[in-house]
Amino acid sequence: MRTHNVRIVHLLAALALFAIGTSALAGCGGERADGLGTEITGADPAPKSKARARQVAAAWDGSTAAAAWRKGYYPMGDTVQLPERAFRNDADKRAYGAHNFVLHTRLPTAAPKNGHVKWESGGSLTLPLTGARTAYEALADGSGDGPHLTVTGAELGETSLLTSRGRATVPAWLFTVKGYDTPLKQVALSPSKPPAPPIKPAADLPSGQLWPLGGLVEVAADGRSVTVIAQHGACDDGPAVHVLETDGSVVLYASMVGTKDGACTAQLIGEKVTVKLDRPAGDRVLLDAFTGRPVPYGEGHGYAPNRS
């Protein structure tokens, strides 16, 4: 799966650069004496990484950027949703992964100018609606070589999507795909413009002690864990991801383990790491300590999620 604006060239580059594995990190939280919330403890990261996480939390909590974030629409899940029981066979799976589609229908040209995000917890937001042609072309930007999926119909409908403000109902283009009983759904809205971060990216930290995250993979349905891509070098012992929780933010800070001789970054590996939280993420801002920005869903620093 992937966000609708990921292109196949990004996917191929990501597959060439990263061998995605799976690991999990869990710890027990404890209240901090400095008022900055709880911090998951495990293998103790470098002190400067901890300090950076506290700086990021302090900069965001109560800021105008955080207030703007809570008013916007930011997907925390895949904006392309597959038909039920997809895929029937390996050829269809490869066609989807390569973005190879064939259009055997007329796409709707008349649609409302705007669409509405409606949150389960209350509140709504009006945003420009993506047209059917634009939505289809975001799906079907492959080379055309190899197997393909055939689209035989399209109509405007709705779907449910996890966002930074909780689950919401959003407009979506429902594409009928030959051989499938339920449609492929493409969310018909672009995310809100992210607010300007109140803190600059990290600089001058010792190599390996703090590293940018590769992107957000998943927030658990109960909000009590998040899975991200953490990067590390081929010659170290892997990544470690820790979390600092406050009332307003969840700050993730990643480092490389076993880098006493310096970080080995000539060959980077992206690894899925699941971090458990003391309480549900809710509408707290999920932040990357290195960049000082919200962790982007799917594509971040060189990582594009595999759509298979």
Image (tube, grey):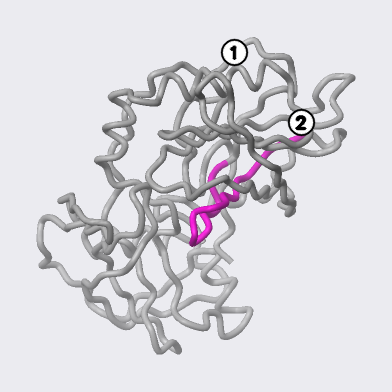
Characterize the local packing of mark 1: few (<14), some (14-19) or many (20 or more) Cα atoms within 10 angstroms: few
Task: Tell whether position 217 is magenta.
Answer: yes
Relative height, residue 93 to residue 65 (above, below): below
**Residue under pointer 1:** 203
> Relative to 186, does residue 226 appear above or below in the rendering?
above
Depth check: give the residue in front, 171 or 198: 198
Residue 61 lies, with reference to residue 220, above or below; the image says above
Does 30 sit left or right of 247 as displayed?
A: right
User: Which residue is at a point 71% across and 17% down the rendered structure image?
Assistant: 47
Q: CA distance from mark 2 to mark 1?
A: 16 Å
Mark 2: secondary structure: strand
Q: Quadrant of residue 101?
A: bottom left
Residue appearing at x 39%, y 74% in the figure: 184
Residue at figure coordinates x 85%, y 37% from the top left:
237
Counting other residues with Cα less than 10 Å from the Cα at mark 2, is it few (<14), some (14-19), or many (20 or more)?
A: many
Q: Earlier in the sequence, mark 2 or mark 1?
A: 1
Q: Residue at x 12, y 65 (%)?
A: 111
Left/right of residue 193 with respect to residue 201 in the rendered view: left
**Is residue 113 left or right of 18 when viewed as pictured?**
left
- For the C terminus, which image quadrant? bottom right
Q: Position of residue 162 (x, y in %)?
A: 39, 57
x and y percentages locating residue 135 in the rendered image = 30, 61
Q: What is the three-letter code of the residue carrying label 1?
A: Ala
Q: Which numbered tag is attached to residue 256?
A: 2
- The answer to whether residue 233 is visible is yes
Which numbered circle lies on residue 283? none
Along the line of sight, the residue nearer the viewer: 12 or 164: 164
Q: Nearer the viewer, residue 4 or 98?
A: 4
Three-letter amino acid code at the position of disc 2: Met
Magenta stretch, residue numbers: 215-232
Answer whether residue 134 is magenta in the image. Answer: no
